[in-house]
Amino acid sequence: MASTDKPSDLEYKASSTPSAQEGIDYFKFDVILRFLLFAASLVAVVVMITSNETELVLYKGRPVPQPAKFRYSPAFVYFVAAFSVSGLYSIITTLASLSVIKKPELKTKLLLHFIFWDALILGIIASATGTAGGVAYVGLKGNKHVGWLKICNVYDKFCKHTAGSIAVALFGTIVIVFLIWLSAYNIHSRIPK
């Protein structure tokens, strides 16, 4: 009847409740990653917003100044809006992570919230990065099948800014994937063995 015997209270409490000292505290690394997400979001937005260029384009035989701005493409406007939300989100969650370092009793509950909201923000910024990348690719290469001309041979500065912004955004997307993995691992390490 060894299998039906209940363990002593002291033994049960020791095995089912992990101590606060168990494992490594990853919230300091979480704060660093959230700051990197903020920096990537800020840089991506600023570089995209400053991607304005005006060139002379021939129209009916006469040169006409034609500007290229991020506001002219709904994909780029969505990109700026998504990464603005991501930047604000990263500020709020960085402050929450800092508060958890000071009050460790909130860790597990906050980790569950982080996974949910991080996944939501990942979906938003990944879709914005992909959308902006698709439009930028058409601007770079054009599309001969439907008659869309490439514009990066004319608007060189605009295209370089857009490409830089999308590259930084891709870095931010990878950072938030690491944040989700870190939160999931943190929750997994708190499960009693």
Image: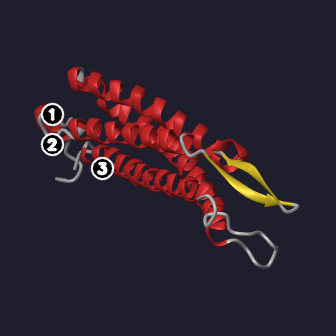
Q: Nearer the viewer, residue 111 or 135?
A: 135
Q: Secondary structure at mark 3?
A: helix
Q: Amino acid at mark 1?
A: Ser
Q: Quadrant of residue 9?
A: top left
| Residue that extends furthest to the bottom in the rendered view of this protein | 145
Q: Which residue is mark 3?
A: 185
Q: Nearer the viewer, residue 165 or 3?
A: 165
What percent of the width, then of the height, locates residue 62? 82, 57
Residue at the spot 54% in from the left edge and 34% down from the top edge: 85
What percent of the width, then of the height, locates residue 129? 55, 54
Mark earlier in primary sequence (1, 2): 1
Mark earlier in primary sequence (3, 1): 1
Mark earlier in primary sequence (2, 3): 2
Q: Secondary structure at mark 1?
A: loop
Residue at the spot 56% in from the left edge and 58% down from the top edge: 159
Foreground label between 1 and 2: 2
Q: CA distance from mark 3 to mark 1?
A: 17 Å
Image check: 66 left or right of 18?
right
Q: Amino acid at mark 2?
A: Ile
Image check: 123 left or right of 11?
right
Residue at the spot 45% in from the left edge and 40% down from the top edge: 41
Q: Quadrant of residue 191?
A: top left
What percent of the width, then of the height, locates residue 113? 44, 34
Vertical placement of residue 155 versus 40, above or below: below
Q: CA distance from mark 1 to mark 2?
A: 12 Å
Image check: 13 left or right of 44?
left
How busy is the neighbourhood of tag 1: few (under 14 within 10 Å), some, or many (20 plus)?
A: few
Q: Which residue is mark 1?
A: 19
Q: Amino acid at mark 3?
A: Tyr
Vertical placement of residue 120 versus 97, above or below: below
Q: Which residue is mark 2?
A: 24
Residue 157 seen anywhere in this rendered image of the structure: yes
